[in-house]
Image: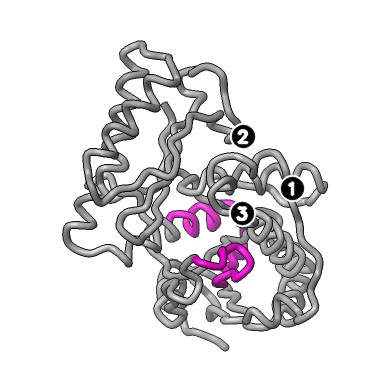
Amino acid sequence: MLVNSHKYGRRTAMKIIQTPKEMSEFSEKMRGEGKKIALVPTMGALHEGHMSLIDIAKKNADIVVVSVFVNPTQFGPNEDFAAYPRSLEADAAACEERGVDVVFAPSASSIYRKDASTYVVEEEVSANLCGKSRPNHFRGVATVVSILFNIVRPHAAVFGEKDAQQVSVIERMVRDLFIDVEIIRAPLVREKSGLALSSRNKYLHGAQLETARRLSQALLVGKKMVEDGCLNIHRVKAEIVNQLSRSSRIRVIYVEIVDAKTSLPVKEIVPGKCRAALAVWLDQTRLIDNMVL
């Protein structure tokens, strides 16, 4: 499928590709022409955070591919897979407007065969943070990303630090498996209010949105403590939890301080090299956020 595009200096129509075979053939053709390909993996419901990833991809490649795939293997049995926002038509229009070359939107059946039994498991970075509260989540992430890498064959892939642990897991996977893809980290994007942009924000309304802003506010309190000289991990974590707990809507899943690059636990806070990471339930919506201290 082709979508006409005239902005951002585009010279060809954006393609919407839905089968792995066609995607692989397109990538092979582009590589044969000496073009550098950048992949932006997404689960759709695109927002300005995703657009920032696309902008970075455009600066680092000749061809930008955005995958739109709600990956079933990274959702737990009681999570929001069925309810996760899906808006392929709007996502494609946003990608076309931003100058994307290809939207790759495969079906689950084309990615996972009925008798699929192979998974990619990273066992150190993924054991912490979200890995504790979401069993098999990162197994699903690593597996689908490796599948996308094999289909799209990008030279580079852009991941946002909104999901900082996810980036760390992918970086470790690429390193350990000698996958020839450059992983580009993109800064977390926030609303003016401080709320981290997330597709799950679409679940929030009214007072919930106001409450969600407490996440970044709590992280800022922790950051200010470090700037003022408090390097005690337990004190900083406790104060972030205290700030979050002031709302009855928020149930804290975890607050941890980790290495800003690897997402692994640390024994002491080193300003600028550590990251406070948190996950909460805000009513029935699971939200995450993080901030370098």
* Residue 7 visible here: no
- Residue 170 sits above or below residue 98 on the image: above
Question: Magenta includes 69?
Answer: yes
Residues 1 and 162: in front is 162
- Please tell me whether mark 3 sits on a helix, a strand or a loop: loop
- Residue 200 sits above or below residue 14 on the image: above
* Residue 53 visible here: yes
Residue that numbered label 1 is attached to: 174
Nearest to the eye among marks 1 and 2: give it.
2
Using the numbered discs, state the Cα–Cα distance from disc 1 to disc 2 in whole angstroms.
13 Å
Residue that numbered label 2 is attached to: 262
- Please tell me whether mark 1 sits on a helix, a strand or a loop: helix
Name the kind of residue labelled 2 in the image.
Thr
Chain-order first, disc 2 or disc 3: 3
Residue that numbered label 3 is attached to: 135
Chain-order first, disc 1 or disc 2: 1
Question: Magenta includes 14?
Answer: no
Residues 68 and 216: in front is 216
- Please tell me whether mark 2 sits on a helix, a strand or a loop: loop
Q: Position of residue 114 (x, y in %)?
A: 75, 81
Pointers 2 and 3 in contact (CB under 8 A)? no
Would residue 135 appear left or right of 174 to someone viewing this image?
A: left
Q: Quadrant of the N terminus?
A: bottom right
Q: Position of residue 76 (x, y in %)?
A: 56, 63
Badge 2 local density, few (<14 within 10 Å), some, or many (20+)? some
Pointers 1 and 2 in contact (CB under 8 A)? no
Would residue 48 appear left or right of 123 to someone viewing this image?
A: left
Q: Which residues are magenta?
A: 52-78
